[in-house]
Image: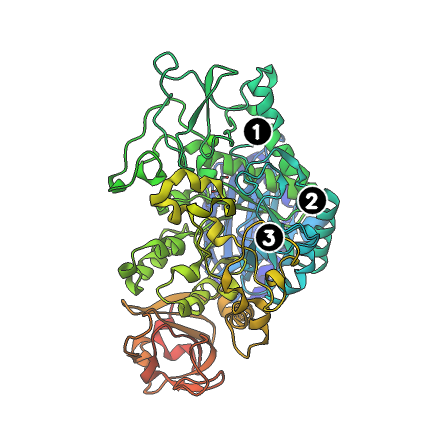
Amino acid sequence: MCSSSLSVAKESFFLLAPLELLRSEDVKNITSIEELEKVKIDEQFIRYCIGEYKPAIITDNLFSFFRFTEKQAYLIIIDKRIDSTSELQRYNFYGLLDTYGKGKIVISSSTLTSEQIKKSINLTNVLINQGQTFILELFQLHTDYDESQDWWMHDVIYEIIVASYQDSNNDGIGDIQGLRQRLDYIQSLGVNTIWLTPIYTSPWKDYGYDISNFCDIDSRFGTLDDFRILIDDVHSRQMRIIIDFVPNHTSNEHPWFQAALHNDPKYIDYYIWHKGKNNGKELPTNWLGASGQRMWTFSSERNMYYLHQFLDCQPDLNFRNENVLDEIEKIFRFWLDLGIDGFRVDAVRHLIENDQYHDEPLSKDAKDMDPNIMYVAYDHTESADQSGSYELVQRWRKFLDKYAYENNRNYIVLITEAYTVDIKKVMRYFGNNREERGSDIPINFLITYYLDKDENEKHGLELDKVLSDWQSNLPEYAWSNWCLGSHDSHRITSRLPSKELIDGFYMLLLLQSGTALIYYGDEIGMCDRPFTLANSDEIVDITAFNYGEKYFDKMIRDRQRTPMQWTSQEANAGFTSSTVKPFLPLSDTWHELNVEQQQNALRSHLKLFQQLVKLRQQAPFYGGYQKKVIATKELYAFIRWLDTNIYLIVININKKGHDPIINDFTKLLKYQNKELFGEVIARSCNILDDSLIGKEGNQINLNNLILQSSEAIVLKLLTCPSNISFCQQ
Ligand code: GLC
Ligand code: CA
């Protein structure tokens, strides 16, 4: 390899023009730079031979490579497909060359429009059409931020159950107008993206995850016009809006199911039907669903069983039927046309079932779990995570790419939900490889699973295992994500060994590399509200009734879905008026635990949350490196750094009452000089001003960092990384 000055490098690329010539027959066989060199047209380019060469993605259809020096890098892309009917392809070049994360087109074949040329391109998502050739000048991920493409990677995504957020018309149910009134608050969190759980027309047997009309808003929440205004409001604040999308099933009240029940030929195969074993006397399989029922229900209308992975009022759609696939794409398009920025696709692991209909085995971990109601008692080898489900996610990613491309839209994000502790299965939702991409954000529930563990297992080593598992399994091209809780798991504050640890967990959520997802109310540390079977009229989550006394407490999801706690003095914490009963009772913690109180306090969970969201904007968090420093039963610490900026985050995992932990971080970070100092940037609420660590701005000697139980801290190191061998990548 030879190298030369960079200005020459740029010139040499210009000599490549006209690039269309490279789309000649010759190019078809190029698989290496040597062969490229043989192509006559390219002689001048090779002659200049600037910088290093590194192959990028090379397939039958694509030839691409990097040319780079220490300070500058280019990516040259040549699509070799000559068949003009070839489809738009999406490639991911991220991670192939150092930390370069995006690029601007500096030269292109004329088939690119000027709009496409203007946009900066994120390397995770390079869309290439048949025969296109272009050269990207590359930038580090943290520089040259491009809202239009990157927003989902750096945002904090705030999940909201509209019904539980703010009521505006005093019927006790939160609604779209109410949510609009709270946008100032959401924006004040620093949160840029909201994700709404289903607000489609629905009988609401499962909080709207049972949809009877995919293209309208349920009247409980307002109208389509209200929703249009909400989208405008959100966008005018430079924020984004994502909606839940539930393709796996519909409500049994959906006209498609009603038509299917009555043998309407068009809809006869929209759902999954089976005659049953032994002349219909037995269920087709032993499959147990995720809502505590067998997956098959008999329909006397059709004299057959239909499949439902969730409640019997949520029949599963048949994705082997092309018409169903078309319908789903129509629905995507409907919401995209309204301006939606992305989708959280529900229950993707349940999309397709093996149509050989074999029984499923009990899980080895079933232990004393009741196999008649507990989903986890089985290994769902036939009904979950089938390859067809992964293919569907990839198909939808392609569909969204195409839509964005054709409509000149910003990046449309695809988030998927798949509850499984098998990390390999979760990772597969990212796609097969760099070219065949699936979900952008297969939600990472590992921290929520960690919180499910027995009390004595919730320690630093287990936590480390969870965090490292994710990082080491993450495909190199994939973007990370973190979440602490959701509408399906009990509130994090109610599951932590000590409530005060919430601040340390915010640090894990917000300061590790990746998109962060936060569930409404967790920013103030809202807790679960207990429900009992005896007070059944309070219960909205009817699924819980399937679990009986023994599992009711564990399974009831109303606990974590109670109305948002806004104020101390107003009736119903400001959620709805005093004259009405909220659709779900509030947690009685609301008098002391609410937004107003935390906004007025000098320090609070809310204020720390806001501070950490701001800190995320700093380059080391935004696009820098990350490394674990130490993990013990009692402690977890990691650093984030870029160039000369290093941050150290230390969390004492112990619950109250343990001895303080003293560590020498000078040694742990392999610092070559004697003393290393860190400035306090953020601290958990339980670190008081007059404690050893004290306030923001204090300088702490890291020879001797003392943290009390459940304390957590963010420090900025006051030295240059060249002296810290730990920071060498
Ligand atoms: C997902 C949702 C859950 C719902 C289920 C059925 O798991 O998160 O709340 O009950 O799908 O749609
Ligand atoms: Ca299904």
Q: Is residue 457 above or below residue 40?
A: below
Q: Earlier in the sequence, mark 2 or mark 1?
A: 2
Q: Which residue is mark 1?
A: 325
The quarter of the rendered structure image containing the N terminus is bottom left
- Residue drawn at x 36%, y 51% is 473
Does the image show residue 512?
yes
Q: Amino acid at mark 3?
A: Pro
Q: Which residue is mark 2?
A: 110
Does the image show residue 21?
no
Judge left or right: residue 130 versus residue 632.
right
Q: Secondary structure under badge 3?
A: loop
Position of residue 417 measured from the top left corner of the image (x, y, whole percent): 48, 44
Q: Nearer the viewer, mark 1 or mark 3?
A: 3
Q: Quadrant of residue 484?
A: bottom left
Judge left or right: residue 300 versus residue 239.
left
Q: Which disc number belongs to residue 582?
A: 3
Q: Nearer the viewer, residue 363 or 676?
A: 363
Q: Secondary structure under badge 1?
A: helix
Q: CA distance from mark 3 to mark 2?
A: 60 Å
Q: Secondary structure under badge 2?
A: loop
Q: Amino acid at mark 1?
A: Leu
Category of crowding for the residue at label 3, using alpha-carbon neighbours closer than 10 angstroms: few (below 14), some (14–19), many (at least 20): many
- Residue drawn at x 68%, y 51% is 176
Q: CA distance from mark 2 to mark 1?
A: 35 Å
The answer to whether mark 1 and mark 3 are in CB contact below 8 A is no
Position of residue 723 measured from the top left corner of the image (x, y, whole percent): 37, 80
Question: Cβ(mark 1) to ligand 2 < 8 Å?
Answer: no
Q: Amino acid at mark 2?
A: Ser
Category of crowding for the residue at label 2, using alpha-carbon neighbours closer than 10 angstroms: few (below 14), some (14–19), many (at least 20): few
